[in-house]
């Protein structure tokens, strides 16, 4: 592992200049443009294990990991072999295939409450379909979500994370009809009292949450929060929905239901279940899922849903992710997080970091972060300097102070130790800037 500064970004800059002529901001998903940290994004050329290389040949230890899916690291041999084999038989059929059933079985073995699922190609589709299904099941239209939680970019979920509790939602993104946005209510994460008040006043179809927030930075629920949501949902007739697109097969071997001992009515999955190929899913009890066409009237479909290559990616990944492997990644994550706490303490910087399984995050502030408002009180300016200093030293962190980070089975003790060395140096440099 080389420790020289990564300052040559010529090829990345050339490619980004071309990309800006073709894509808004030069990207096909906004956060990749580095608006959260400033500066020029590096263009990925290749990945293997814990490492990515950019278009200029610079090497980084990667903690973005494609924003979560790569729980085995980049280009794991089991996934490459599975893809090479499966593609010989064709890349898409638009017909049922056995691998879809195999992957659904594998998911249900770890998350038994997912009696039935429907595969989609993105988390957005899964969350959007859950909103439709929950509304159809309950014959209600309001959805409650939490500030700082992201559930994809369907209209129902692009609602401002504003303060004020029972406030009606307003469009956060132009183009979302106000009539629709009004049906999405928001309140602060971990604020059970606010949830209780809204749920008693408004007929909610669903209470939807990230069981651990990754999209407002890494935020954990209090011990009471998720059991409390279950009780309120039961008492008021709302469905409880876990968006486990990010947390699924990361925060615990069996996901949030195992971690918190609470069973949701419906669940969205994505990321890890495709192992880096486009797969997401939603599911729950058979009686709920049978509302979906063709057994029921709620329409939802997809030309590439259950795609053979995507299913193979998921099967190979989940197959390799045994409980033992999960526990190993968890231990490495704990080591990295503790090491970062020690570094911050040595530098005398306000810092809080935490992890659950292989999902982790940190903020430059003291104290426990319980809400998105808490997260926003962290030192974002220091984060930006730290991010760039880490990048120059070959550590790839999420380019935003409000995103979780990940770990893979390819990150061994040597990579963790090297990461900590570089981050120690990076924090010193960021503080000196
Ligand atoms: N829900 C959660 C919790 C997510 O983290 C994401 C993506 N980061 C989504 C939904 C949307 O998934 P996708 O980007 O695949 O549409």
Image (spheres, rainbow, N blue to C red):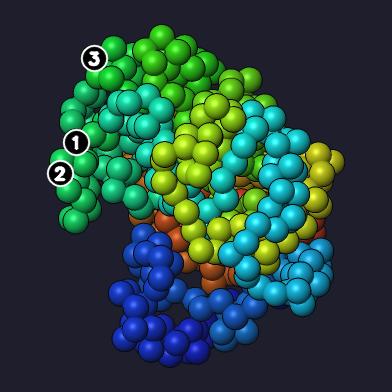
Residue depicted at 44% across the width and 74% down the height: 41
Relative to 203, residue 266 above or below: below
Reply above or below: 248 against 26.
above
**Residue furthest out toward the left:** 178
Q: Mark 1: which secondary structure? A: loop
Q: Are marks 3 and 2 in contact (CB under 8 Å)?
A: no
Report x, y in % for residue 266. Answer: 51, 32
Q: Which residue is mark 3?
A: 201
Residue found at x 37% / y 87%: 17
Residue highlighted by disc 2: 178
Q: Secondary structure at mark 2?
A: helix
Q: Label 3, label 1: how many angstroms apart (C-alpha)?
A: 15 Å
Residue at the (58%, 20%) spot, across then down: 262
Name the side, left or right, on which 86 lies relative to 182: right
**Label 3 crowding class (10 Å Cα cut-off): few <14, some 14-19, many 20+?**
few
Write down the residue under mark 1: 182
Name the one closer to the observer, 143 or 305.
305
């Amino acid at each position: 592992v080389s420790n020289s500064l990564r300052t040559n970004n010529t090829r990345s800059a050339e490619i980004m200049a071309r990309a800006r002529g073709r894509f808004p901001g030069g990207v096909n998903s906004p956060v990749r443009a580095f608006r959260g940290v400033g500066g020029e994004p590096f263009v990925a050329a290749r990945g293997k294990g814990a490492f990515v290389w950019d278009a200029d040949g610079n090497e980084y230890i990667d903690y973005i990991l494609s924003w979560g899916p790569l729980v085995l690291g980049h280009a794991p041999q089991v996934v490459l072999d599975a893809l090479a084999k499966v593609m010989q038989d064709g890349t898409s059929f638009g017909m049922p295939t056995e691998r879809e059933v195999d992957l659904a079985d594998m998911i249900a073995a770890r998350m038994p409450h997912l009696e039935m699922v429907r595969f989609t190609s993105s988390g957005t589709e899964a969350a959007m379909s859950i909103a439709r299904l929950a509304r159809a099941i309950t014959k209600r239209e309001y959805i409650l979500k939490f500030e700082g939680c992201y559930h994809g970019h369907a209209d129902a979920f692009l609602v401002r994370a504003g303060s004020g509790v029972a406030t009606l939602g307003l469009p956060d993104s132009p183009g979302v009809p106000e009539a629709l946005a009004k049906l999405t209510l928001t309140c602060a994460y971990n604020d059970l009292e606010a949830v209780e008040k809204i749920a008693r006043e408004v007929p909610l179809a669903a209470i939807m949450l990230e069981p651990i927030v990754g999209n407002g930075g890494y935020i954990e629920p209090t011990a009471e929060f998720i059991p409390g949501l279950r009780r309120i949902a039961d008492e008021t007739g709302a469905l409880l929905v876990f968006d486990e697109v990010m947390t699924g097969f990361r925060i615990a071997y069996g996901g949030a239901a195992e971690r918190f001992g609470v069973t949701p009515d419906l669940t969205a999955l994505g990321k890890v279940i495709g192992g880096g190929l486009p797969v997401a899913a939603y599911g729950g009890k058979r009686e709920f899922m049978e509302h979906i066409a063709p057994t029921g009237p709620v329409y939802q479909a997809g030309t590439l849903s259950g795609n053979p290559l995507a299913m193979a990616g998921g099967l190979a990944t989940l197959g390799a992710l045994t409980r033992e492997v999960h526990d190993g990644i968890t231990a490495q994550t704990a080591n990295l997080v503790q090491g970062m706490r020690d570094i911050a303490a040595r530098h005398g910087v306000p810092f809080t970091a935490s992890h659950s399984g292989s999902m982790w995050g940190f903020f430059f502030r003291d104290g426990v972060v319980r809400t998105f408002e808490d997260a926003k009180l962290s030192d974002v300016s220091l984060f930006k300097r730290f991010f760039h200093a880490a990048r120059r030293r070959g550590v790839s962190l999420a380019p935003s102070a409000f995103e979780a980070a990940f770990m893979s089975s390819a990150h061994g003790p040597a990579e963790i130790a090297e990461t900590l060395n570089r981050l120690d140096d990076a924090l010193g440099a960021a503080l000196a800037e």
